[in-house]
Amino acid sequence: MKVVVFGAAGRMGCEVVRLVAQAQDMSLVGAVDHAGCSALGKDAGLVAGTDDLGVAISPDLGSALLGADLLVDFSIASAFDGMLRTAMRAKVAVVSGTTRLNETSQTLIDRAATTIPVLWSPNMSVGVQVLAGLVEQAVQQLGEEYDIEVVEAHHNRKVDAPSGTATFLVEAAQRARAGLRPVFGREGQPGARGVDEIGVHALRGGGVIGDHAVHLIGEAERIEIVHRAVDRGLFARGAVRAARFLASRPAGRYSLADVVATSVTS
Ligand SMILES: NC(=O)c1ccc[n+]([C@@H]2O[C@H](COP(=O)([O-])OP(=O)(O)OC[C@H]3O[C@@H](n4cnc5c(N)ncnc54)[C@H](OP(=O)(O)O)[C@@H]3O)[C@@H](O)[C@H]2O)c1
């Protein structure tokens, strides 16, 4: 599989470049970043801290996509639409983990999916996908006698709360129990806990990559389902797994849940 990485000089881009360089079934044929990027012209492998791969980082996505099979994007929301339009013109499949996409970008994904395979996921962790499935199953089976609280922890540089993953887990619980409504933190006199509440709490500190815990609390027992990210390379591994999944798919919009489901049944 001939892979191009967009956002190649970034933290996630470098993780993907390293994985692609190691993969037997993949080769890096293009590495792209923006025109003002300080790594332009440098070898993508060397920038990523691995071997010289003979692929210089370029600002020209259109040229990089000539002859490519798949584009992996971890860049910035403002570059997303242009990236996707270029991939559509080149008829190259796209795996994207870029976050904070707006409605316009989401609509564009739907449009692109009529002509190319596209998989966008704001969380490329296969483990988090499995966690969401476990949460949905547990909430459905435990019923209203169990209160649900979600606690997330991230590094002290994170500027938003709750995390996208915490929201994703709330949505998993809501699929299992209609009417649940998130309550973000508690202070003062919030009153007794309502049966329709799902508490969401954010811890911030140090260098935590991302911990998520879902507490299911009954009168006489508690279940805690926990996921801890210990290395951000896990997101790149999920993206590479998604790339392998997408390689043999027709045009369409796919999710990481599709990747996980296929892995289980195949
Ligand atoms: N889905 C997931 O599981 C997951 C996991 C981690 C991160 N992410 C997301 O992935 C994205 C990248 O994260 P990161 O941590 O790798 O960030 P990063 O280190 O800032 O990397 C982003 C790269 O994109 C470059 N870039 C900026 N503007 C661009 C443009 N117009 N066109 C092309 N490239 C451009 C940046 O260049 P400069 O540094 O010069 O600006 C940088 O090289 C973010 O949206 C982040 O939230 C998703």
Image: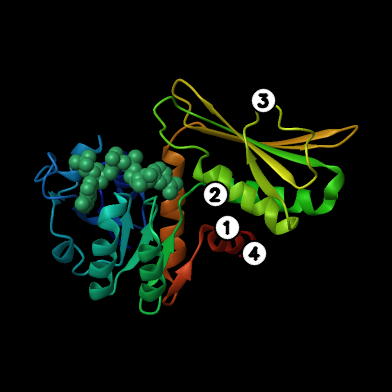
Question: Which residue matches tag 3?
Answer: 188
- Residue 140 position, x and y percent, is 79, 54
136 on left or right of 40: right
Per the model, the C-alpha gap separating discs 4 and 2 is 15 Å
- Residue 152 position, x and y percent, is 57, 34
Question: Which residue matches tag 4?
Answer: 265
Q: Are marks 2 and 3 in contact (CB under 8 Å)?
A: no
Question: Which residue matches tag 1?
Answer: 260
The three-letter code of the residue at mark 2 reads: Val
Q: Earlier in the sequence, mark 1 or mark 2?
A: 2
Residue 126, label in figure: 2
Q: Earlier in the sequence, mark 4 or mark 1?
A: 1
192 on left or right of 67: right
Per the model, the C-alpha gap separating discs 4 and 3 is 49 Å
Task: Look at the image and tell me whether residue 109 can be seen.
Answer: yes
Q: Are marks 1 and 2 in contact (CB under 8 Å)?
A: yes
- Residue 254 position, x and y percent, is 48, 67
Per the model, the C-alpha gap separating discs 4 and 1 is 9 Å
Mark closer to the observer (2, 3): 3
On the image, which quarter does residue 93 sit in?
bottom left
Look at the picture and state if 111 lies above or below 234.
Answer: below
- Residue 176 position, x and y percent, is 74, 56
Per the model, the C-alpha gap separating discs 1 and 2 is 7 Å
Q: The residue tagged with tag 4: helix, strand or loop?
A: helix
Look at the picture and state if 172 lies above or below 249.
Answer: above
